């Protein structure tokens, strides 16, 4: 790789560093959530073997809690330097502005995720005879695709990284 190519890569990374970090946090939180959901769906299907609606609800609530807690922690750890004034004090105004934007972004993306996850889990349980852990993986991947698309569109519209 030439020095020009390396410089170009560094320049591109620098330009898109915030959105890369944002997506990295989404992906890390999603992977942890997906792994946890496999165990949760398996356990729920043992407890309620024919109640697909309840299994879907349990999976949905667990996904919501696990993902949001992990994502918020990762986001604020990665961006803590953005919220410090030159004198070392916290920039409360910037925190509030970005928190409002982040809640809007996550909220809309979460709605698309939850709807997709819930309906796809229910439909696949009703339509196919597949191992619950495989259903969990399939529905989680489908829902995360929608989530990431909506989150990135909203981050741009809300100008989260400006």
Image: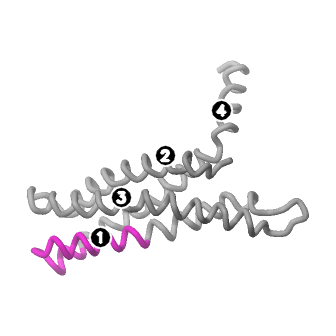
- Where disc 2 sits, the SS reads helix
Mark 4 to mark 2: distance in Å? 19 Å
Q: Is residue 7 left or right of residue 133?
A: right
Mark 3 to mark 4: distance in Å? 29 Å
Question: Mark 4 = which residue?
Answer: 12
* Of the two numbered discs 2 and 3 in the rendering, the one whose residue sits closer to the viewer: 2
- What segment carries the magenta color? 43-65
Q: Which of marks 1 and 2 is nearer the N terminus?
A: 1
What's the residue at 30%, 50% (across, down)? 142
What's the residue at 15%, 71% (across, down)? 52
- Where disc 3 sits, the SS reads helix
* Of the two numbered discs 4 and 2 in the rendering, the one whose residue sits closer to the viewer: 2
Q: Nearer the viewer, residue 100 or 8?
A: 100
Mark 4 to mark 1: distance in Å? 38 Å
- Where disc 4 sits, the SS reads helix
Mark 1 to mark 2: distance in Å? 26 Å
Question: Mark 2 = which residue?
Answer: 153
Q: Is residue 154 above or below residue 98?
A: above
Q: Earlier in the sequence, mark 1 or mark 3?
A: 1
Question: Mark 3 = which residue?
Answer: 113
What's the residue at 18%, 81% (across, down)? 47
């Amino acid at each position: 790789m030439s020095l020009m190519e390396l410089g170009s890569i560094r320049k591109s990374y620098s330009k898109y560093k915030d959105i890369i970090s944002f997506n990295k946090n989404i992906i890390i939180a999603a992977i942890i959530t997906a792994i946890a959901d496999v165990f949760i769906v398996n356990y729920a299907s043992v407890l309620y073997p024919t109640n697909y609606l309840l299994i879907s609800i349990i999976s949905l609530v667990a996904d919501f809690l696990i993902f949001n807690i992990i994502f918020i922690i990762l986001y604020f750890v990665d961006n803590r330097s953005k919220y410090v004034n030159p004198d070392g004090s916290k920039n409360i105004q910037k925190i509030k502005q970005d928190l409002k934007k982040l809640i809007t972004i996550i909220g809309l993306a979460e709605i698309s995720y939850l709807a997709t996850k819930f309906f796809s889990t229910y439909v696949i349980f009703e339509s196919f005879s597949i191992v619950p852990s495989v259903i969990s993986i399939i529905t989680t991947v489908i829902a995360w695709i929608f989530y990431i698309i909506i989150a990135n569109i909203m981050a741009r519209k809300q100008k989260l990284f400006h």
